Amino acid sequence: MNRILILSKNILAEQEIQKKLQGLNYEVYCSVSLIDYCKQKNNVFAFIKLFNYVILSDSICESEVSYLVPLMKEHSLIVIREVGSETSEVEQQSLEEGRIDAIISNNESNDDLRECLSRLENLTKQTEERSVNTWERDINQLQILFEVLHRLSQIEAKILTILISSGNQVVKREDICEQVWQKEVSKSHLVYLSSAISRIKNKFKQAGFENVAIYTLWGKGYIIDQKLLHQIKTDSTLTQIVSKYDI
């Protein structure tokens, strides 16, 4: 049975989601005190490693989330962030960066919870399989890249082209928005950009690309993975595909 740890500042507030998860046959443990134990670096990690997933409640502030996530990741837990009715831009970027693995709302339905956890479990299995069965031939990698580039939407391809053109330089989010939409940057542009970056990453990840395609540097912007950049620039066919999106 998969075990889920919920870290919260208010156990009573987690009763509904805890009940839903138990109804899906997950073993659930909810704790307030473990947050402080983690901060104090007390010996609680042997206990934490008993769990497969950790849900960080919306009652936990972002500064605490930033501290807790690396500790959870260090012990191979799948990290899920619980939010209110809407996802903030900070939370969306955390998802992009891979700091968290999923976002759920505090009024999630049973079906949505089941699908979310199932997807995370499948992605974990795929990652483990890829780590064992790494690519052995460059031709296979090029074929994967060829297929992914053709699956990108026009805006996604434009974003990737901007990052390719910037090489090993970090590109500010606002600069990307200006080049893509050719108008004054708005909050909706930034939100759409975050979502598009996430989709690009997922398409490469699902295709089996072994690195993160795009890295998010907190407060600075985005940079393309240098291995991906090299593979695209050294293959004329791949270069031709992205060149048609030059801005």
Image: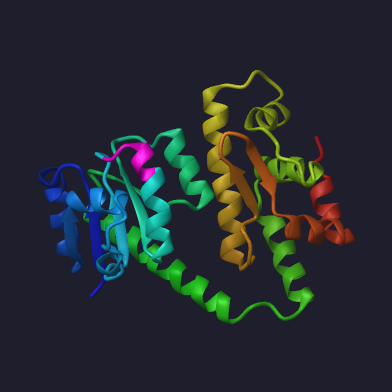
**Residue 62 forms part of the magenta stretch:** yes
Left or right position of 15 against 209: left
**Residue 80 forms part of the magenta stretch:** no
Q: How was this image coloured?
A: rainbow
Q: Residue 236 at what x, y percent from top left?
A: 89, 59
Which quadrant would residue 57 be assigned to in this image?
top left
The residue shown at (73%, 43%) is 163
Q: In which quarter of the image is the N terminus?
A: bottom left
Q: Residue 71 at what x, y percent from top left?
A: 39, 56
Which quadrant would residue 10 be assigned to in this image?
top left
Counting every numbered tag in the picture gives 0
Majority secondary structure of the magenta segment?
helix
The answer to whether residue 101 is visible is: no
Q: Residue 43 at what x, y percent from top left?
A: 27, 63
Left or right position of 36 against 211: left
The residue shown at (68%, 77%) is 135
Q: Which of 154 and 177 is in front in this view?
A: 177
The residue shown at (37%, 63%) is 77
Left or right position of 215 against 95: right
Left or right position of 118 against 197: left
Which span of residues is magenta-colored? 60-65
The answer to whether residue 73 is visible is: yes
Task: Determine the residue located farthest toward the top in the rendered image.
Answer: 184
As displayed, is residue 52 above or below residue 8? below
Which quadrant would residue 145 be assigned to in this image?
bottom right
Q: Residue 116 at what x, y percent from top left?
A: 35, 58
Q: Quadrant of the C terminus?
A: top right
As displayed, is residue 68 above or below residue 124? above
As displayed, is residue 36 above or below residue 206? above
